[in-house]
């Protein structure tokens, strides 16, 4: 699954997530390469599909659930952000509180990619 970095660009400054992933062995932009990565791992008959989900104002039900999951994940990232020196715990928590308040007043689209294959 790939979550577009656009979600991480809320006015609440949650745009530190891409910086955090750059400091860890994570690759949030893997969606477009996912099928080729699976083929490279030896899978056959690989299928991949990308869907766009609306998040925020005028969102879909799945978009509401995804945004709630995403913001909950970001809450659990608070110690990591502080440990990496990207934001203090207080600053990160303030930004998250603002993001929770803004989730119904702003909107964006998120691209999700899923892929599978046979061994």
Image (cartoon, rainbow, N blue to C red):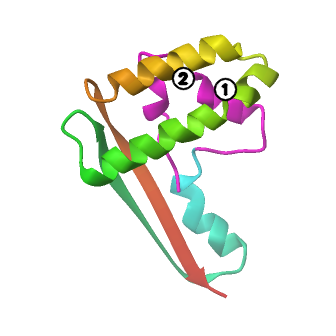
Residue 15 in the magenta stretch? The answer is yes
Apparent side of residue 75 relative to residue 65 in the rendered image (left or right): right
The residue at the point 58 percent across, 34 percent down is 74
Which span is picked out in magenta?
1-28
Q: Mark 2 points at which residue?
A: 15
| Secondary structure that dominates the magenta span | loop
Disc 1/disc 2 C-alpha distance (Å): 8 Å
The residue at the point 43 percent across, 17 percent down is 98
13 w.r.t. 37: above or below: above
112 w.r.t. 42: above or below: above
Residue 105 placed where, x, y %?
A: 25, 24
The single residue placed furthest to the left in the displayed view is 58
Q: Which quadrant holds the C terminus?
A: bottom right
The residue at the point 51 percent across, 54 percent down is 32
The single residue placed furthest to the bottom in the displayed view is 119
Q: Name the residue under label 1.
A: 19
Residue 91 placed where, x, y %?
A: 62, 11
1 w.r.t. 84: above or below: below
> What is the quadrant of residue 116 in the picture?
bottom right
The residue at the point 71 percent across, 24 percent down is 81
Q: Is mark 1 on a helix, strand or loop?
A: helix
Residue 25 placed where, x, y %?
A: 78, 44
Could one spot residue 6 in this view of the protein? no
The single residue placed furthest to the right in the displayed view is 83
Apparent side of residue 83 relative to residue 53 in the rendered image (left or right): right
Could one spot residue 101 in this view of the protein? yes
Are the residues flagged by discs 1 and 2 in contact, CB closer than 8 Å? yes
| Near-viewer residue (47 or 63) | 63
């Amino acid at each position: 699954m790939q979550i577009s970095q656009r979600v991480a660009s809320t006015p609440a400054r949650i745009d530190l997530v891409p910086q955090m992933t750059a400091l860890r062995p994570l690759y949030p932009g893997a969606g477009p390469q996912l099928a080729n990565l699976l083929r490279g791992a030896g899978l056959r008959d690989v299928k991949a599909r990308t869907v766009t989900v609306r998040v925020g104002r005028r969102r879909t039900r799945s978009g509401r659930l995804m945004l709630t999951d995403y913001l909950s994940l970001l809450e659990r990232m608070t110690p990591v952000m502080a440990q990496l020196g990207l934001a203090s715990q207080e600053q990160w928590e303030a930004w998250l509180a603002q993001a929770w308040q803004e989730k119904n007043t702003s909107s964006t689209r998120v691209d999700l990619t899923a892929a599978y294959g046979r061994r």
